[in-house]
Amino acid sequence: AQTVTQSQPEMSVQEAETVTLSCTYDTSESDYYLFWYKQPPSRQMILVIRQEAYKQQNATENRFSVNFQKAAKSFSLKISDSQLGDAAMYFCAYSHKDSGGSNYKLTFGKGTLLTMNP
Amino acid sequence: DAGVTQSPTHLIKTRGQQVTLRCSPKSGHDTVSWYQQALGQGPQFIFQYYEEEERQRGNFPDRFSGHQFPNYSSELNVNALLLGDSALYLCASSSRLASSYNEQFFGPGTRLTVL
């Protein structure tokens, strides 16, 4: 079974600074997908960034980038130039597509609460 | 274009009762997945529906059942409610038609409280 571990229950960052959230996972699959989701107090789960395991290049989306280390099964999220709106719960998640063509279930970590220092 | 919608927003039930939660997927999506998110935890996969059938199931008892309608909307039913069923229930929709992985779009959730 696949597992996702987020070892940082809470992190804080000052506005305009950079913060890195950690995530490790375990799987026996060779082709899979990794995600970072953001869940603000409004509860709406929003996809921040996605990484396909077969791609060696790390994904980037504006101020968000990942450090994907496939051999180490590590997938960290870096947020640059942090803004007040970045404060939220961040979840690392794993998935793979089954042979039937459907999207397999998402397996989530327990989350990291990111707070902004005044 | 409406995203994923869920109803109701909040619900309070007592132990032993039954509850039905509803989800309408994003336009163009044919697959609906349900997740349970207990307070302070990450979402846990309950099951997934497409073509009106349950296709995948997580580690949840038979008290949790679902249905998908021809218009792709879905219901989650929970019978004999327990205190531990109190959680945020998230619905996510996606499409099987694209050639690559499709993002699962989440609804705002239904907060269920069991007293």
Image (cartoon, coloured by chain):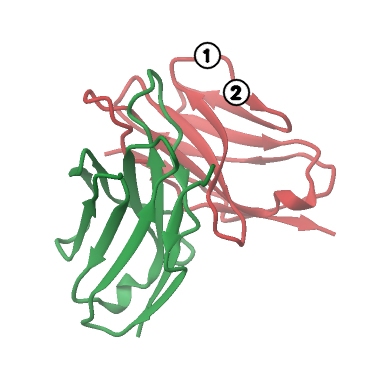
Chain colours: A red, B green
| Residue of label 1 | A56
Which chain does tag 1 point to? A
Q: Quadrant of the N terminus of chain A?
A: top left
Q: Is residue B59 visible?
A: no
Left or right placement of residue A115 versus residue B50 in this view? right
Compared with residue B44, is residue A81 higher up or lower down, i.e. above or below? above
Q: Which residue is drawn at 21% across and 82% down?
A: B16
Q: Which amino acid does label 2 sit on?
A: Ala
Q: Which amino acid does label 1 sit on?
A: Gln
Residue at the left extreme, as displayed? B62
**Are the residues flagged by discs 1 and 2 in contact, CB closer than 8 Å?**
no
Classify mark 2: residues with Cα within 10 Å, few (<14), some (14-19) or many (20+).
Answer: some
Q: Residue B18 is drawn in which quadrant? A: bottom left
- Picture coordinates of residue A59, whole percent (x, y): 60, 23
Q: Residue at x 36, y 41 (%)?
A: A3
Please state which of residues B55 and A105 is positioned toward the viewer in this rendering: B55
Q: SS at mark 2?
A: loop
Q: Residue at x 82, y 42 (%)?
A: A17
Compared with residue A98, is residue A21 higher up or lower down, i.e. above or below? below
Q: Residue B23 is drawn in which quadrant? A: bottom left
Please state which of residues A6 and A114 is positioned toward the viewer in this rendering: A114
Please state which of residues B69 and A108 is positioned toward the viewer in this rendering: B69
Q: Which residue is drawn at 33% across and 29% down?
A: B96
Q: Is residue B53 visible?
A: yes
- Picture coordinates of residue A26, whole percent (x, y): 37, 34
Residues at marks 1 and 2, CA–CA distance in whole angstroms: 9 Å
- Picture coordinates of residue B44, whole percent (x, y): 35, 53
Q: Which mark is residue A59?
A: 2
Q: SS at mark 1?
A: loop
Q: Which of marks 1 and 2 is in front?
A: 2
